[in-house]
Image (cartoon, rainbow, N blue to C red):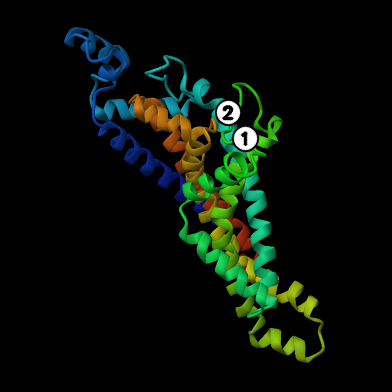
Amino acid sequence: MWVARRLAAGIVVVLLVSIVVFAATQALPADPAEAILGRGATPDRIEALRAELGLDRGLVQQYLDWIGGLLSGDLGRSLAANVPVSDLIGDRLVNSLVLLGLAGMISLPLAVLLGAVSAVRRDGVADRLGLGISLVLTAVPDFVIGMTLVMVFATSVLTILPAVALIPAGSSPLAHPDMLVLPVVTLVLAVVPYLYRLVRASMIDVLEADYAQMARLKGMPRGVVMRRHALPNALVPTIQASALVLGYLLSGTILVEFVFRYPGLGSALSDAISSRDLPVIQAITLIYAVAVVVFNLLADVLTVLVTPKLRTAGR
């Protein structure tokens, strides 16, 4: 029942987000018909194209038409490219998911490992060094991290990796691992510091708790205390924060894709905004919103699964 209620709440959030997305895209400056035809188009041609695209209808009717199409699996038709939106962003969605998946699979385990080691060796050299590096990386914007990596590994110093990820159309990003290295590392360096400090703080709190201290006094080895008590309890806030981190990664891919010319949803969104391609903007923005809702739902479910008290309360 709890999962059903949480899912229903997520659907309501997505519906509200769809209204905001539609209203925001309608508020963009310039007319899509004018953007397609150019400045030299006559008013008659502009009005004819607006009628053809359905832009002359009322906003409520346009929204209902859009939502009805989404429910039937129709994302609409690109105003600029005159092709179905699903065809236009299909490959780019896969590319972004590959980038997001690789960054997530590296970031989460790495942050847990580094945070656990730092907590066990609290106030040691490695701990102080880790905290210092994490603070610096947190203060540096993503695009600065990306540009620094490009200068060090692709242009000025080593030149061992490509500076841009110009993956051929129709080709899998995994077929070009060298082009994925810098974008993935940029995202990892952007999110690991936050999770690292969270895991470290959670582990320290658990290790200083009375039950953990009592277990140590009874002769339980440190490794067993870590495995049975510290790590499971420290994972609860980490799992909850991972939803925010994955959402941040998703939004971070927009900037990273721009820096590395990576052909993902972020670059498609940038192109669509430039051309006032409303159906593409609406589809991509809604995809991001749905992804964030799904990430939060998964985080809530995982939190309940690893917390016996919450499992009992949810019944």
Image quadrant occupied by the N terminus: bottom right
At horizontal 71% and vertical 30% (from top left) the residue drawn is 175
Judged left or right of residue 55, residue 246 is: right
Above or below, 102 relative to 62: below
Instruction: Return the residue at label 2.
Output: 166
Closest to the observer: 20 or 202?
202
Spatial CA span between label 2 and label 1? 9 Å
Give me the disc on residue 162: 1
* Residue 73 in picture, x, y percent from top left: 50, 26
Above or below, 196 relative to 61: below
* Residue 191 in picture, x, y percent from top left: 55, 55
Q: Residue furthest left?
A: 43
Task: Label 2: state its secondary structure.
Answer: loop
| CB atoms of marks 2 and 1 within 8 Å | yes
User: Does residue 59 appear anywhere in the picture?
Assistant: yes
Task: Label 1: state its secondary structure.
Answer: loop
Label 1: few (<14), some or many (≥20) within 10 Å? some
Q: Amino acid at mark 2?
A: Leu
- Of badges 2 and 1, the one in the foreground is 1
Image quadrant occupied by the C terminus: bottom right
At horizontal 23% and vertical 12% (from top left) the residue drawn is 46
